[in-house]
Amino acid sequence: MKVGLLTREYPPDVYGGAGVHVEFLAQELRALTELEVHCWGEGEAEGVLRHRPADGLAGANEALRAFSVDLAMAAELQGRELVHSHTWYAALAGHFAKLLHGVPHVMTAHSLEPLRPWKAEQLGGGYALSGWAERTAIEAADAVVAVSRGMRDDILACYPAIDPGRVRVIHNGIDTRLYRPDHDTSALQRLGVDPSRPYVLFVGRISRQKGVPHLLRAARAFDPEAQLVLCAGAPDTPATGAEFRELVDELDRARDGVHWIPETLPRPQIIQLLTHASVFVCPSVYEPLGIVNLEAMACGTPVVASAVGGIPEVVDDGRTGLLVPYGARHPESFESALAQAVNRVLDDPPEAARMGAAGRQRAVREFGWERVARRTYELYEEVLGRK
């Protein structure tokens, strides 16, 4: 089976959960299909074709630049039997290939544009274009993959024209051979984190979606003995970045042990940070699944997370971590509950260790990439069988 996998992010240019998903899915699919990856970037490698926005669109709106990449991808997909796109950045390429080459289009929705209104701050009028692209592609796709049951509900609510029978839940995965406890502390020492003190860890983008301002305000009430480590970069907008810096500076004046790491760290260093964290925090206000929670669990670390989207399908409340209800109308209540949950884990190291061990077991048992790839391949066969 000749498959074209379409994505914006692909190693070495991975900055979010969708990129992680495609990276590991592609590794497993290569054993099952004749796979060709189409992504953004420069240069080529075996089985990987990289595309860049049209030169004439330098400085243009990001959505228009994305559309130019979609056109380039579609032109190169001749001979593929099926195409599989990820995120709105590549969805139109899949839709164009379906129309141009007469092949089925499978689309994985990692998030939904109607549920991310803050993207208008980043894309301006391009947000209307990204929404149009997503709607056009998802409503015409032969099959839609939702990365959680919560995400499937959101897809059908946002796009009621879609036949529910075309929407299939296939959870994200985690490579538990790669993400596993690493007890070395050299990365912590290099980054200035004190290994002898407990610390709370956040890893993610500086965006409205990730709820970082909530975390920083909640951290005012964290146990003063605990450090806070923020692996946070790539702000959505200058304004979002400025707000983050202001909150970090304010927190840094009020307590010690605040470590902001703005650069993207190599994966081995992230794994060390995850391993030694007393608790990992995911304060997202919108999260279709949240691969980063799986990464923390695979490293044996308890998770405190907001109970939104697909997170409750990953974090088993009371067993592998604690879930905190999120309400946009009462952010102070959410922040207070977040602080209480974090302190509860910090105050009971034996219970935290039990949660961490249970999280590792759950990640190994239920979220392996081989299983994800096999279910994805079975969906390909089903879609092709309809033709």
Image (cartoon, rainbow, N blue to C red):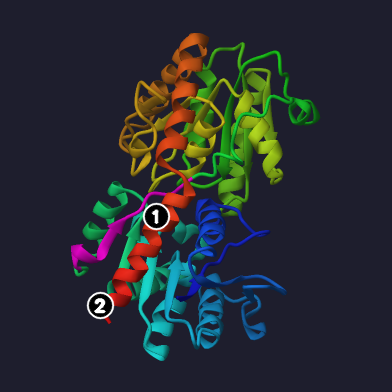
Mark 1: secondary structure: loop
Q: Is residue 171 magenta?
A: yes
Report x, y in % for residue 131: 37, 68
Mark pair 1, 2: CA separation: 34 Å
Of the two numbered discs 1 and 2 on the same chain, state the one appearing first in sequence: 1
Badge 1 amino acid: Arg
The residue at which mark 2 appears reads as 386
Left or right: where 234 falls relative to 365: right
State which mark lies toward you, 1 or 2.
2
The residue lying at 55 percent from left, 85 percent from top is: 76
Report x, y in % for residue 242: 62, 44
Q: Which quarter of the figure is the C terminus placed in?
A: bottom left
Check the image and report above or below for 95 versus 23: below
Q: Nearer the viewer, residue 386 or 191?
A: 386
Displayed quadrant of residue 192: top right
Mark 2: secondary structure: helix
Crowd rating for badge 2 (residues with CA inside 10 Å; few <14, some 14–19, many 20+): few
Check the image and report above or below for 87 versus 65: above
Crowd rating for badge 1 (residues with CA inside 10 Å; few <14, some 14–19, many 20+): some
Report x, y in % for residue 264: 69, 46
Q: Which quarter of the figure is the N terminus placed in?
A: bottom left
The residue at which mark 1 appears reads as 116
Q: Nearer the viewer, residue 223 or 374?
A: 374
Magenta range? 163-173
